[in-house]
Amino acid sequence: LLEFMPLEGAHQSTSEQLKSGVKGNFQPTLNGYVNFSQRHGDTETRRKKLCELCASVRDFHINFFAVFQVQLLIRRAKDFHISMAKDKLYRTNNSPADFTFNANVAEVFDDMLKRSVPCYDQVIDMTATWLARFCNNGGLIYDLGCSTGTTLLELSRKLEQLDLSYIGIDNSSPMIKKAVLKAEMFSRKDRVRFIYGDIADIELEPCCACILNYTLQFIRPLMRQTFLSRLHHALRPGGIIIISEKVICHDSEINRAFIDFYHDFKRSQGYTETEIARKREALENILVPFSINENIDLLKKAGFCHVEPFFQWFNFTSFVALKSF
């Protein structure tokens, strides 16, 4: 039911571990829980399946630590609804007029990301590749506008071999609460911290990397230059900033095509025409995208010496920028 990773020893599936009666410490992985959540839709179903798993673990006399971890998952799934609830915010007539990162959004945000941002997982994979190249042991990585913490938790898993620290900051209290809960659930609290605060003015420690995953587009356009200059100042020499954004194209014909392709993507993810239209209206004047060249100009004016897009899916682009030594 749930992927497990032994703290030591060869990797096995849950069924293999249980059948062989392996005794040892096991810890739930982030991907395992996400995959489990996707396969078993509602919270009550997930809770029952986790109870079955817990019973299986007891039957095979896996040690107390493993049982405790599964029981923790049951409690979290039941009491805190940490799993990916389906995004239905814009399906009814009671849809919010303006988009805000409130408790209702936080509840469905993981599902919203998966179904609204093309190639989200691939961008995290590529981000890990960049960080592995430019961050040294002992380095600090910020995720500014971290939402529910998915990016940092995945990066901490992918970069397990490096001695890195991670701090996520967000000005949405419901998002931070969920991120903290996920860090506890996946035993990452020792390496990943989440802080409630405004990324526009919070004091940053010297760091080796800053990540902004679809964050800059929500900062007021007139504040973006000053904000990026602050990040450049906080980065250590040789530091890296990775920014992913929704972008516009100043060629109206191509821009229209990009938008149509994106709406096709959302339809393929199960969103209705009504949901797409209502969400777009709710984001009007809240999400303000720049073009690729405008984002590059901002980064260069902030002091970054090397700036380049490294990934693009029509109107979604990821950028990397390096601070000189």
Image (cartoon, helix red, strand yellow):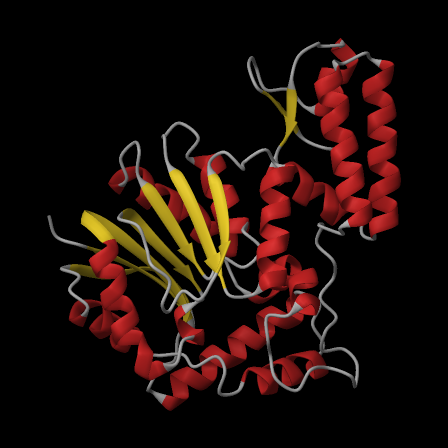
From this viewpoint, which residue is outermost toward the bottom?
252
Residue 172: x and y in percent read 56, 65
| Horizontal side, residue 175 vs residue 249: left or right | right
Residue 65: x and y in percent read 71, 20
- Quarter of the view holding residue 226: bottom left
Residue at horizontal 31%, vertical 45%?
130
* Number of numbered markers: 0
Q: Is residue 248 above or below residue 147?
A: below
Q: Is residue 213 above or below residue 45?
A: below
Residue at horizontal 72%, vertical 21%?
66
| Horizontal side, residue 302 vs residue 57: left or right | left
Residue at horizontal 51%, vertical 66%?
171
Question: Which sits in the foreground, 57 or 20?
Answer: 57
Residue 280: x and y in percent read 58, 83
Question: Which sits in the foreground, 319 or 218?
Answer: 218
- Quarter of the view holding residue 271: bottom right
Residue 209: x and y in percent read 30, 49
**Where, quadrant-wise, is the N terminus in this rendering?**
top right
* Residue 1 can be seen, yes or no: no
Question: Which sits in the foreground, 284 or 260?
Answer: 284
From this viewpoint, which residue is outermost toward the left?
325
Residue at horizontal 70%, vertical 61%?
107
| Horizontal side, residue 24 vs residue 171: left or right | right
* Residue 12 can be seen, yes or no: yes
| Horizontal side, residue 262 vs residue 44: left or right | left
Q: Is residue 59 above or below residue 256?
A: above
